[in-house]
Image (cartoon, rainbow, N blue to C red):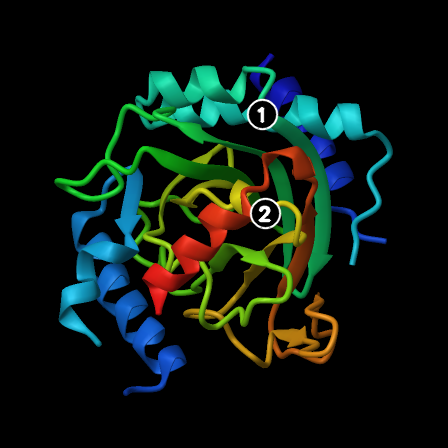
Amino acid sequence: MGNKNNEMDNLLKRALYKAESPNPLLVQKVKYEIIKGESIMEKSTVVKHSFSSVAVLVLAFVLISSTAFAAWYFLKPSEVANTFENKALSAAFDSENAININSSITSGDYTFTLLGVVSGKDISDLPYSSDTVQNERTYAVLAIQNADGTAMLGTQDENYGQIPFFASPLVKGLKPWEVNAFTMNGGYSETVVDGVMYRLVECDNVAIFADRGLYFVISTSLAYDTDAFIYNEQTGEIKANEDFDGASAVFELPLDKKYADPSKAKQYLDSLS
């Protein structure tokens, strides 16, 4: 029976993996290196990072036969939240305010699947840093797989973390190296289940920018990498750079414009400057 289960797992995996002041970038890279060093020392099965916790230290497309099948194969966003013992967030991902996306893109050696996103007030049991609770936050769940069908390294593997992943919401028309998960009090939790890496990304509420257009990006880089993405300063559009020596993907976040709050958005941007 065990061999049959393993054979089925392998078939499913093969089906899903088939692909048809200082320089701000330098500051972000230093932050990432500090966070990564701390996490590897911990060697926990669930890894949680907070970008803001170190702020004081440093100034495509994949063809899948059925979207429903892919959604069944992966953990649901609410189940991912449960792995981090966050019952409030799990309930939020199961609520009508959450958006199920289940969109996959293969780039380089990886397949990225954006599973879902939710924004709101007081929707998490856990603070994003050791002593700070942000009332209005955005949470997104991403699945990361090896494109060749092999399992992702577990968090306790000695080589875990050697390949970095930058994952963040971005706002159309705003310079992505200035407004991203690093600068928006962001962080992430990470775990590996059945060879699939799940990343729960969080940052301040991006729904207030819904009228501008929103993206969710990921790349094999330490921070936002201008080589991984192409930003059009005239239109504000962002797309993955096909010539990037690595993996990069850009998803559109389909947030309803009714959630936009231009006045609050302006106040927030002023607070970042």
* Viewer-nearest of discs 2 and 1: 1
Residue 178: % across, % down: 44, 71
Furthest residue to the front? 263
Res 66 quadrant in image: top right
- How many numbered marks are there? 2
Residue behind mark 1: 98
Within 10 Å of disc 1 (Cα), the crowding (few <14, some 14-19, many 20+) is many
State how far apart marks 2 and 1 are (Cα).
23 Å
Which residue is found at the position 25% from the left and 56% from the top?
Answer: 52
Is residue 148 shown to the viewer in this render? Answer: no
Which label number is shown at residue 107?
A: none
Which residue is found at the position 34% from the left and 72% from the top?
Answer: 28
Looking at numbered disc 1 in the image, what kind of residue is underneath it? Ala
Furthest residue to the top? 1
Looking at numbered disc 2 in the image, what kind of residue is underneath it? Gln
> In the image, is residue 109 above or below residue 214?
below
Residue behind mark 2: 145
Local secondary structure at mark 1: loop
Q: As drawn, is 193 to the left or to the right of 233?
A: left
Residue 11: % across, % down: 73, 32
Which residue is found at the position 19% from the left and 55% from the top?
Answer: 53
Nearer the observer, 229 or 22: 22
Q: Are marks 2 and 1 in contact (CB under 8 Å)?
A: no
Nearer the observer, 232 or 11: 232
Is residue 133 shown to the viewer in this render? Answer: yes
Local secondary structure at mark 2: strand
Comes first in the chain, label 2 or label 1: 1
Which residue is found at the position 29% from the left and 86% from the top?
Answer: 22
> In the image, is residue 21 above or below residue 184?
below
